[in-house]
Image (cartoon, rainbow, N blue to C red):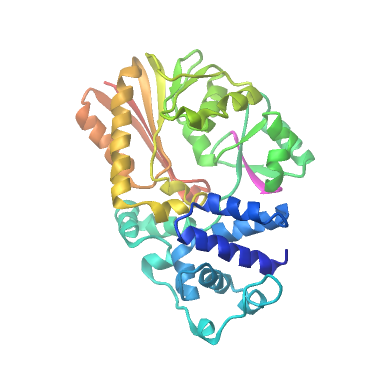
Amino acid sequence: MTPAARWAAAATVLDQIEAGEPAEKALTTWARKSRFAGSKDRAAIRDHVYDILRCWRSTAALGGGETGRARVLGRLRQTGDDPETVFTGEGYALAACTDAERQAGRNPLGAEALDLPDWLYAIFLNDLSGDADVTAEALRHRASVFLRVNLLKASLARAQDALRNDGIETTPHPLCATALEVTDGARSIAQSTAYRTGLVELQDVSSQAVIETLPVFKGMRCLDYCAGGGGKTLALAARIDGPVDAHDADPRRMTDLPERAERADARVMRTDKPKGPYDLVLCDVPCSGSGSWRRAPEGKWRLTPDSLAGLHQTQAHILDTVTGLVAPNGSLAYVTCSVLKSENEDQIDSFLTRYPDWTCVQQTRFGLQSGGDGFFSAILTRS
């Protein structure tokens, strides 16, 4: 496919997303109908789609409309590329721009320029104060790719050497001792020997740093109550060099966990009905995902005040549920990948009001300025 044809395909996918189709489903549907597209074509189209999703409002303003075609035009103007080289009307390219399209569009303002819904921008300003704009701006750009070195099987140096043999260059990241930032060759990770043999796992650096904040000791009994795909489960198992119980409200989310654990030489046991007491219960609760919207930008356009309120209820319910699983001298770790105060500090304050015999001994925010996603963690113990 020509570069112009890739943009045309992206416009088609964007129209499906505007109509309510999830991005991944829209991309998969397009790929299945377009067998002529090679892997590089699919990767380029995916990049175009996600770059525009991160800048959904501003590209529409710059392009003068909310169609995929208008947003492609807006993105080209945003990046300083000449639209006339893409809107050529030749082959499978988008039709040439009309005079009306050439004159349409305007500079975005306020929340629109920062690519947030108005109601969310107001929350950012309240919760993040001077960091509101810089956080919103960071969410408009692609996230770096990070790997967690599995210390059960390799040192950082050995993992780097193995990755380099497959053309993947990395550098250690100061936020976490197990983190490598990929500087070249990211698309080769899944096929690399280091990944396939469990020396490394894909995991954001802030997510790894959260695990480093947890109070651990040899021989402790641990539960990951909201395990999902198991990224933090595996990191915790590696850190304690021992077993971790994994639970999730939807066990289907843990389908790949046994295979991942075997590859990593990690001891993980899935459990539908956890039985305490545990020395540590980790709750990486369902949340808005606002700290990771660079990776999943649809989240900021799908979130509503009502769905956020529903998440608040779920988070509080999980905290209420797990209190009985924590040993008398144990710890409860509450974690989100959110930058919103209502999901973080406010939840902890509310919990402590409901349970005055508990104490928060540590709260940590990881901002996007550190290089990774936005995360929050709190460590709670009984007084």
> What number of labels is visible?
0
**Which residues make up the magenta segment?**
178-185
- Residue 56 drawn above or below residue 280: below
- Residue 261 appears at what percent x and percent y? 60, 24
At which x and y percent is residue 159? 70, 33
Q: Position of residue 318 (x, y in %)?
A: 33, 29
Majority secondary structure of magenta residues: strand
Q: Is residue 339 left or right of residue 101?
A: left
- Can residue 212 be seen here? The reply is no
Q: Nearer the viewer, residue 73 or 67?
A: 67
Q: Residue at x 69, y 41 (%)?
A: 189
Residue 100 seen in this snapshot: yes
Considering depth in this image, is 154 or 273 the residue closer to the camera?
273
Which residue occupies the extreme right position in the image? 165
In the figure, residue 85 lies in which quadrant? bottom right
Furthest-bottom residue in view? Answer: 99
At x 45%, y 60%, the residue is 19
Residue drawn at x 48%, y 81% is: 104
Q: Left or right: 317 with respect to 270?
A: left
How far across and how far down the image is residue 205, in percent? 54, 40
**Where 86 sits versus 344, above or below?**
below
Which quadrant holds the N terminus?
A: bottom right
Q: Is residue 190 magenta?
A: no
Decide whether residue 182 is among the magenta residues.
yes
